[in-house]
Amino acid sequence: PTPWLVVPAAGQGKRMGADRPKQYLDLAGEPLLRHTLRRLHAAFPEARCVICLDDDDRWFRNAWMPFAHWQRVSGGAERMDSVLNGLHAMAADANDPVLVHDVARPCVMPNDLQALYQATLESASGALLAMPVADTMKRDNGDGASFRTECRDGLWHALTPQGFRHGLLLRALTQAQRSGALVTDEASAIEALGLAPRLVSARRDNIKVTHPGDLGLAAAILSAQAGEIHK
Ligand code: CTP
Ligand code: MG
């Protein structure tokens, strides 16, 4: 089988502070989003892909889309709203697997994509790529000082892709939207239903390009990965 893909790409990249959304900034000679789409396409060449784009987006080119079957939907105010627009637009059955991947993660590797997809098919509550927290975690007092050290045992960073059955994800995000909860990933909406998505341990180099320095970092990661992918 092949999954449906939703690629939320309607963000403004405010923390990047560039002259355009970060997905269109140059990364190793190409717009960042081309790297992301190429990685997804290499792993799932037959997938049907929905990309969420801002209505005012002046940068996206249809020719950049590597998938034969794809569609564009409008982004929403928050990431969750963009993903929901994507879920509504696709002609999926309730049981079809859907993988959601941030356009801002161009360094995701084939093995992690396959492992996440496998876990999505196996787990009734879905799955997400994640990474155990390595640093000691501090809680601040709201005034730039630390007053507590949080136990990092059992703490994970949530990455993407995250994968779920279409019907379950639609129900979870619809409920999150109604309740007004601020949901920054799909898994938190699933957790709010009392379900426990499976954590799939991922490579550390699947970074989300967020701040200006991250572009250089992503370029270094891509070049370090090149040998691995073509081996
Ligand atoms: N995203 C989206 N629709 C929104 C907000 C975000 O599709 N209304 C997407 C972004 O394009 C990105 C992903 O969700 O692929 C993760 O969001 P984030 O890293 O926060 O990107 P931006 O919102 O663009 O950045 P910032 O928060 O700094 O403005
Ligand atoms: Mg954002």
Image (cartoon, rainbow, N blue to C red):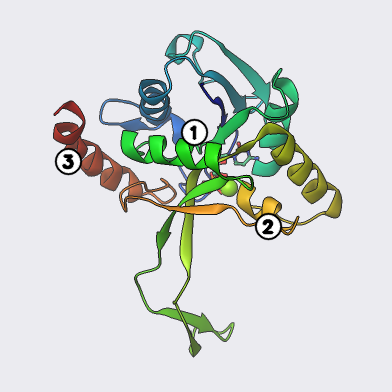
Q: Residue 123's spot in the image, x, y percent? A: 57, 45
- Label 3 CA crowd tier, 10 Å (few <14, some 14–19, many 20+): few
Q: Of callouts 3 and 1, which one flags the residue occurring earlier in the amino acid sequence?
A: 1
Cα separation, mark 3 vs mark 2, equals 35 Å
- Label 2 CA crowd tier, 10 Å (few <14, some 14–19, many 20+): few
The reply to whether the residue tagged 2 has its Cβ within 8 angstroms of ligand 1 is no
Q: How many marks?
A: 3
In the depicted structure, whether residue 90 falls above or below residue 167: above
User: Left or right of 228: which side holds 75?
Assistant: right
Secondary structure category for the residue under label 1: loop
Residue drawn at x 51%, y 11% is 62
- Label 1 CA crowd tier, 10 Å (few <14, some 14–19, many 20+): some
| Residue extending farthest front | 122
Q: Residue flagged by tag 3: what amino acid is it?
A: Ala
Q: Return the residue at label 2.
A: 191
Cα separation, mark 3 vs mark 1, equals 27 Å
Q: What is the quadrant of residue 32 in the picture?
A: top left
Q: Is residue 78 visible?
A: no
Frontmost residue, 119 versus 226: 119
Q: Residue 84's spot in the image, x, y percent? A: 72, 35
Give the foreground label among 2 and 1.
2
Residue drawn at x 55%, y 34% is 99
Q: Return the residue at label 3.
A: 224
Q: Return the residue at label 1.
A: 20
User: In which of the image's four quarters is ligand 1 placed?
Assistant: top right
Q: Residue 196's spot in the image, x, y percent? A: 62, 57
Q: Is residue 10 visible?
A: yes
Give the foreground label among 3 and 2.
2
Residue drawn at x 74%, y 44% is 173
Frontmost residue, 17 versus 141: 141
Residues at circles 3 and 2 in contact by the CB criterion of under 8 Å = no
Cα separation, mark 2 vs mark 1, equals 34 Å
